[in-house]
Image (spheres, grey):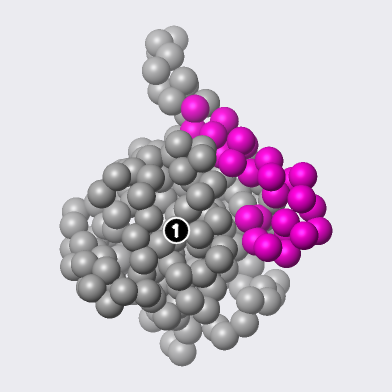
Amino acid sequence: MSSFVRSDLSDAAVRAERQAALRRGHAAPLAAFAEKLRARRPGTLVPDADPFDGGTGARILFLLEKPSRLAAETGFVGRDNPARGAHTLGRFLAEARVPRGESLIWNAVPWWNGTAKVTAEERRAGAEALRDLLALLPKLRTAVLVGRVAQTVWTASGGAAVPTYETAHFSANVRAAFPDRWAAIPEIWAEAYSSMIRLAASPKM
């Protein structure tokens, strides 16, 4: 699949293909991680990281806030969900020219519990889960923190020793309330990715 082409997870055949791909080497550790998170909170849903993205080989992490209802239903986090927000996510990643194989999309609070609201306790649990996730990403070089929840959970987790970029969330609500900040998102994402590439290419001192 092209780095910038979206498919549609509302299609059962597409979902089946993704489920099979969870067994791939770069995706399997994250699938096992998601399964552990489900066991921590019975009755909640934890969508898997998209195995068509970078998995454990990702060099840039896009940390979102909390899974949507549709992500919980399809079983996957990311740009290919059948929702307006996911379409915007995919569009912005394409505009920023971030290849799928270089990136990982995840949520600061990985559990869906029937509400988009995020409690203080969920932030604490999300920080613990994020620490575990970061240990699975040995090639990570940059993190993009998308929205306030992602930013507070990253800070609470201790983060990782990589450059970070903060942006507004790409939701329709943010677009209505803060159109300039919303419109700036793909430019910041592009800078995060291109800066990572420049650093990786620079001679080691």
**Is the stretch drawn in magenta largely helix, strand or loop?**
helix
Whether residue 129 is visible, yes or no, is yes
Task: Identify residue type, mark 1.
Answer: Arg
Q: Nearer the viewer, residue 176 or 46?
A: 176
- Taking the image as shown, residue 10 lies to the left or right of residue 161, namely left
* Mark 1 element type: loop
The x and y percentages for residue 67 are: 52, 70
Q: Quadrant of residue 81?
A: bottom left
- Taking the image as shown, residue 50 lies to the left or right of residue 125, namely left
Total of numbered circles in the picture? Answer: 1
The x and y percentages for residue 190 are: 54, 34
**Crowding at mark 1 (Cα within 10 Å: few <14, some 14-19, many 20+):** many
Q: Is residue 111 above or below residue 101?
A: below
Taking the spot 57% from the left edge, 63% from the top edge, the residue there is: 85
Instruction: Check if residue 59 falls in the magenta segment.
Output: no
Instruction: Check if residue 170 falls in the magenta segment.
Output: yes
What stretch of residues is rendered in magenta? 169-194
Taking the spot 59% from the left edge, 41% from the top edge, the residue there is: 186
